[in-house]
Amino acid sequence: METLEFQAETRQLMQLMIHSIYSNKDIFLRELISNGSDALDKLKIESLVNSDLDVDRSDLHIALTPDADARTLTVTDNGIGMSRDEVVSLIGTIAKSGTAELLRKLRESSSESADLIGQFGVGFYSSFMVADRVTLVTRKAGESTGTRWESTGEGTYTIDDVDDAPQGTAVTLHLKPADADDQLHDYADPAVLTSIVKKYSDFIAWPIRLDGNSINSQKALWARPRGEVTEEEYSEFYKHVSHDWTDPLETIHMKAEGTFEYDALLFLPARAPFDLHSRDAQRGVQLYVKRVFIMADCEALVPQYLRFVKGVVDAADLSLNVSREILQQDRQIQAVRRRLVRKVLGTIKELSPEKYATFWGEFGRVLKEGLIEDAANREVILDLLSFSSTSSPDGLTTLREYVERRPEGQTEIYYLTGDSRATIENSPHLEAFRAKGYEVLVLTDPVDEVWVDQITEYDGIPLKSVAKGQVDLGESAAETPAEFEDFLTWMSGSLSESVKEVRLSTRLVDSPACVVGDADDLTPTLEKMFRAMGQPLPPVKRILELNPTHPLVTGLRDAFSAGTRDADAAELIYGMALLAEGGELSDPARFSRLLADRLSKTL
């Protein structure tokens, strides 16, 4: 027997593994099973490549053997095994350049740690989180002598030759005393072991046996050809990963090959979860690497606006940190994300009309967020959106359909935002557009207030708010009639605390007045949203537009021409315009008094 010391950097890394890197002690079993699975994979490949290698491949498996009395847990595989030199190299040292730099980064921030996954020793060190002594017995396939390794993790280890070691590797953990207050972490308990395997290693390709029975399903649906998976199997798997009780709306099964390989099995739900719009809701798909569970909600692979997508991504290789708990933000991750997004958006586009109607009713509002978040896919997302409009009171229309049916002479796509369809349809802003037969999109979702300010056109056609700026419906007056000039100047001065300008309107037919914003102004709804988020904004004054043919406006103008300056009437007209668009009065009590006084004089 020989006693050796761990390499200095190895001792430091072991302490970090035990005390800092892993956030969950259960991870140790995932790591040991992953090592065993890798050993079985290597044996299978080596036996195919090396015809002289005489090994038995008839029953390759991983076995868990707990002993509650002895307080031990043994994880065994009959895979490729290790030679004595490999044991020393893989466990006693870290045979990788830049180790000192790695340790420095680990101490500073685990999110910047280098990739050591794939080296036996790194995951193996996690055993010392739950064991005060670890014994390893291994024999490499094709060799006659095995190796026994043992350590308490305190700086030294012993190593010795073993003549009767079976092929493969057996790791025995001499467990620390079970936590009396938490039996969930008694790793000598078969029920605890089964639960951990089901969570982290259920889809490992090799059988994982406990008391002679296989406890993992081995059924990684995503790794099987689509033609070999039934709709019932897809549905059951969706319910497993989503915790939903309904069948999925659509299944997306994809396989990427080439420089970076991965399988993905994603689902579009048929119903929105209750927390879809909650800020604290979990999102993301489950991430596996070589069928080993890494994390439940991998946000790096799914953008916020596709948070309703459920499923699994299983990569052949991926840049993880040492703990496998945090993804490195590298080109691989971004490439997978881009492909998944394109595939999901493409699937939505190909939905049948019935399925699309279901999808839009549940997730349309969320999908619109992509117009703000995902500039690269804006054109694709715009083609997926549906809107209510003044020409489709009982249905929806796409922008493409809107453009194709617009009348000759209409050069813009018109829209109006508001709190509800009823408010928008009764808005005076629509009067001239209805008279001309121009369709107006009805946008009532809060997110509509944001994206319309960022997207100015569709397919080269400008998007235009009917409540902002000047509108030209082919009948705009070249200039203000002379009989209105002084009147408008007086009105502007009388209402200067509330509006920036009073002008004549080309968008009104029946109503006396309406309030509009300049082309670049925030809408009242967006202004309230920003203030609710605590963002200070200067007061946004809007423009009062008057209908020059309405009796109320012409009567007030005639009174002005006769020398009467009726400031209260001007204030009432402004207040009525605010109420007509669903706005809020700054002083409702004063407006009520003015209106009551005016009405009493007519009785």
Image (spheres, grey):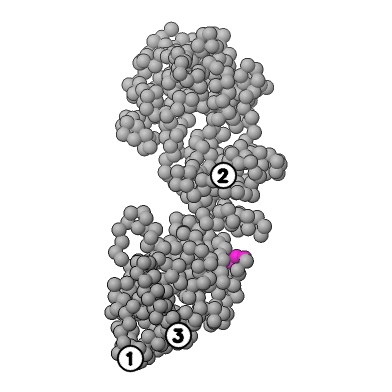
Amino acid carrying label 1: it is Ser
Q: Which residue appears at 56% of the width and 25% of the height? A: 195
Helix, strand or loop for disc 3: loop
Going from N to C along the chain, the mark reached first, 1 or 3, is: 3
Q: Mark 2 or 3, which is nearer the eye?
A: 3
What is the quadrant of residue 144 in the picture? top right
Q: CA distance from mark 1 to mark 3?
A: 17 Å
Q: CA distance from mark 1 to mark 2?
A: 69 Å
Give, as a single range, the part of the protein colored magenta: 395-399
Instruction: Report x, y in % for residue 17.
Output: 39, 25
Q: Which residue is mark 2?
A: 310
Assess disc 2: are there few (<14), some (14-19) or many (≥20) residues with their C-alpha within 10 Å of its C-alpha: many
Question: Which quarter of the image is occupied by the C terminus?
Answer: bottom left
Going from N to C along the chain, the mark reached first, 2 or 3, is: 2
Q: Nearer the viewer, residue 103 or 346?
A: 346
Q: Which residue is mark 1?
A: 561
What is the quadrant of residue 554 in the picture? bottom left
Q: Is residue 84 above or below residue 403?
A: above
Regarding residue 549, the answer to whether it shows in the image is: yes
Q: CA distance from mark 2 to mark 3?
A: 57 Å
Helix, strand or loop for disc 1: helix
Q: Which residue is mark 3?
A: 550
Helix, strand or loop for disc 2: strand
Marks 1,3: beta carbons within 8 A? no
Q: Residue furthest front?
A: 603
Assess disc 3: are there few (<14), some (14-19) or many (≥20) residues with their C-alpha within 10 Å of its C-alpha: some
